[in-house]
Image (spheres, rainbow, N blue to C red):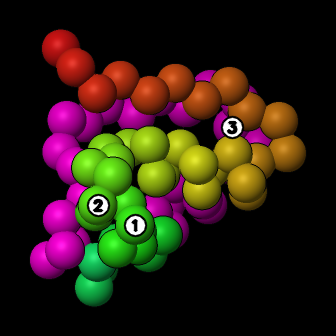
Amino acid sequence: MLIVEALARTGLQHLSFFDFDTVGSLDLDRLLHGTYRDVRLHRTKVDIAAHAARRSATDANIRVLTQS
C-alpha cells in the first residue's frame, strides 16, 4: 500500500491494479488500510489499494480489475 500511495502522490495519472484476492483476517497485520470490516465485506485488496491511492492522488485515473 505504501508504494501505491507513493506512486499516486508523485503525480502518475494512470494506475491499474490487478488482483483477485480478498482481504482475510490474517492479512490485516501487513495490509496498511485493511480493517475487520473489509474482511466481513469480502473486499478485494485492490479495492482497498485504489481507495488509498484516490485519497492520496492529486489527479489520477485509477482502474481496478478483479477478474480475468
Which percent across, then down, holds residue 20? 19, 35
Between 43 and 60, the one nearer to me in the picture: 43
Q: Which residues are magenta?
A: 1-27
Nearer to us in this view, 8 or 28? 28
Q: Residues within 10 Å of mark 2 (few under 14, many from 20)?
A: few
Circle nearer the viewer, 3 or 1? 1
Asked if residue 21 is among those painted magenta in the image, a careful observer would answer yes
Q: What kind of residue is marked 1?
A: Arg
The mark found on residue 40 in the picture is 2
- Identify residue for label 3: 12
Q: Which residue: 40% across, 34% down?
A: 17
* Closer to the camera in the image, 37 or 49: 37
Is 17 left or right of 33, judged from the image as shown?
Answer: left
Q: Which mark is residue 37?
A: 1
Task: Classify residue 35 by image quadrant.
Answer: bottom left
Quote the CA–CA distance across marks 2 and 3.
32 Å
In the displayed structure image, the side of residue 15 where residue 28 appears, left or right: left
Reading the chain from its start, which is encountered first: label 3 or label 1? Answer: 3
| Foreground: disc 2 or disc 3 | 2
- Residue at image position (35%, 23%) is 65
Where does the image place residue 51, in percent across and percent down from the top left?
Answer: 59, 49
Query: Given the image, on which type of amino acid does mark 3 rest?
Result: Leu
- Crowd band around label 1 with a 10 angstrom C-alpha radius: few (<14), some (14–19), many (20+): few
Q: CA distance from mark 3 to mark 1?
A: 29 Å
> Magenta stretch containing residue 15, yes or no?
yes
Is residue 10 visible to us here? no
Seen from the viewer's position, the closer of residues 53 and 3 is: 53
Please report whichever mark, 2 or 3, sits nearer to the chain's N-terminal start. 3
Q: Quadrant of the N terminus?
A: bottom left
Q: Secondary structure at mark 1?
A: helix
